[in-house]
Image (spheres, rainbow, N blue to C red):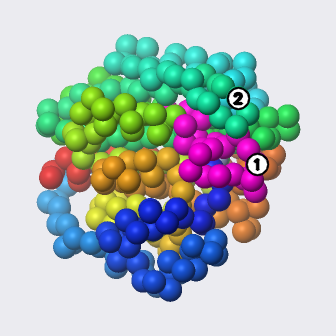
Amino acid sequence: MTGKRFSIPILLLAWACTFLSCDRDKDAAQAQGQPRTDTSTTGSKAATPPLTFPPDSGPPPTFDGNRSIEYVKEIVAFGPRPIGSANHKKVEDYITSHLKGDAVEDDTFTADTPEGKFPVHNIIAKFPGTKDGIIVIASHYDTNYPLRNTPYVGANDGGSSSALLLELANQMRGQKRDGYSVWLVWDDAEESVKPDTEVNFLSDSLYGIQHLADTWQADGTLKKIKAFLLADMIGDADLDIDRDQNSTPWLEDTVLEAATRLGYQSHFFARSNSMLDDHLPFVKRGVPSADLIDFTYGYHNVFWHTPQDTVDKLSPKSLDIVGCVILETVRLLDTK
Ligand SMILES: [Zn+2]
């Protein structure tokens, strides 16, 4: 999760107000950088009529939270993994080593940042389906660059969701997908290279996913994407996924429907926030997008972007909940 999470670019605000039915008072508060903690809108912001889905036709999805948290431990064992570092390269290799036999593509380029040029490497694993269209599930895997000389390992921020995607790949591998194609994306250079307090959000963050959105817009892929699901900071043992005002309401409602079907709805959307995260390049291009993030990581988010972001704060159950809810969401989307 990158910095400056509560201030929103004006253009995005205008877009959001068109599609998310914001009121002007909330926009004004947001534009001034004030945290938004309004919980009164939970479940009521659908811009489209409520979606209805058929009953599930099979058993609930399966996920292995214990294996997933072992992946988290292995990722953080490499140490800090900021862009341009040797550890970063090790984690790239670690991720691709788990995708042997899968259809993997690379999106590699050089990012020009306020701290110089860095190689950036998005990793995409494609699981083909029978329906025409793509569901993208994404997570960044880099750690915060300004903390590169500290013990910061981003167990939750970047680690948990990257591990989650590795386990999603395990669940999909070898299975015939009777639905949309699913593309898993480990995107790179999400974090800003300047400290959170100095970040110009539009120019110093989301390097990898921005490049991927541009690439997919240019080659026509973007039009095929039915949904963009982002996972970020989803391993907290005290799991409370925020409803995000910048996400697409009907898609978040679909996530809530999935969570409710699995009995996990108490972990979703009790709070409302406005997240600046990897989904924004897709939101701005009109792709239905949902950011699944728990941005209260410790009291007042105290562990975020600190060396206290360690595996002991996480739970395999949280990974299991989010993994199953994402798979159930995909199953619901497959019916449309
Ligand atoms: Zn972060």
Q: Is residue 316 magenta?
A: no
Q: State the extent of the magenta-drawn residues as a range.
A: 186-207
Q: Which residue is drawn at 24% across and 33% down?
A: 220
Between 299 and 187, the one nearer to me in the picture: 187
**N-term mark: 2 or 1:** 2
Residue position marked by numbered label 2 in the rendering: 116
Q: How busy is the neighbourhood of tag 2: few (under 14 within 10 Å), some, or many (20 plus)?
A: few
Q: Which residue lies furthest to the right in this view?
A: 150
Q: Eyeballing the image, is 17 above or below 226? A: below
Q: Is mark 2 on a helix, strand or loop?
A: strand
Task: Residue 257: name its quadrant.
Answer: bottom left
Q: Which residue is drawn at 64% across and 64% down?
A: 296
Q: Does the magenta stretch include residue 205?
A: yes
Between 202 and 129, the one nearer to me in the picture: 202
Q: Residue at x 38, y 54 (%)?
A: 283
**Image coords of residue 268 (percent x, y):** 46, 66
Indicate left or right for 4 with 253 as reference: right
Q: What residue type is labelled 2?
A: Gly
**Image coords of residue 226 (percent x, y):** 24, 46
Mark 1 CB lies closer than 8 A to ligand 1: no
Mark 2 CB lies closer than 8 A to ligand 1: no
**Image coords of residue 321 (percent x, y):** 47, 53
**Image coords of residue 44 (percent x, y):** 34, 79
Residue position marked by numbered label 1 in the rendering: 195
Q: Main secondary structure of the magenta part?
A: loop
Indicate left or right for 58 with 104 as reference: left
Q: Specify the label residue 155 is tagged with.
A: none
Q: Which amino acid does label 1 sit on?
A: Pro
Q: Eyeballing the image, is 231 above or below 175? A: below
Tell me if residue 50 can be seen. yes
Between 290 and 35, the one nearer to me in the picture: 35
Q: Is mark 1 on a helix, strand or loop?
A: loop
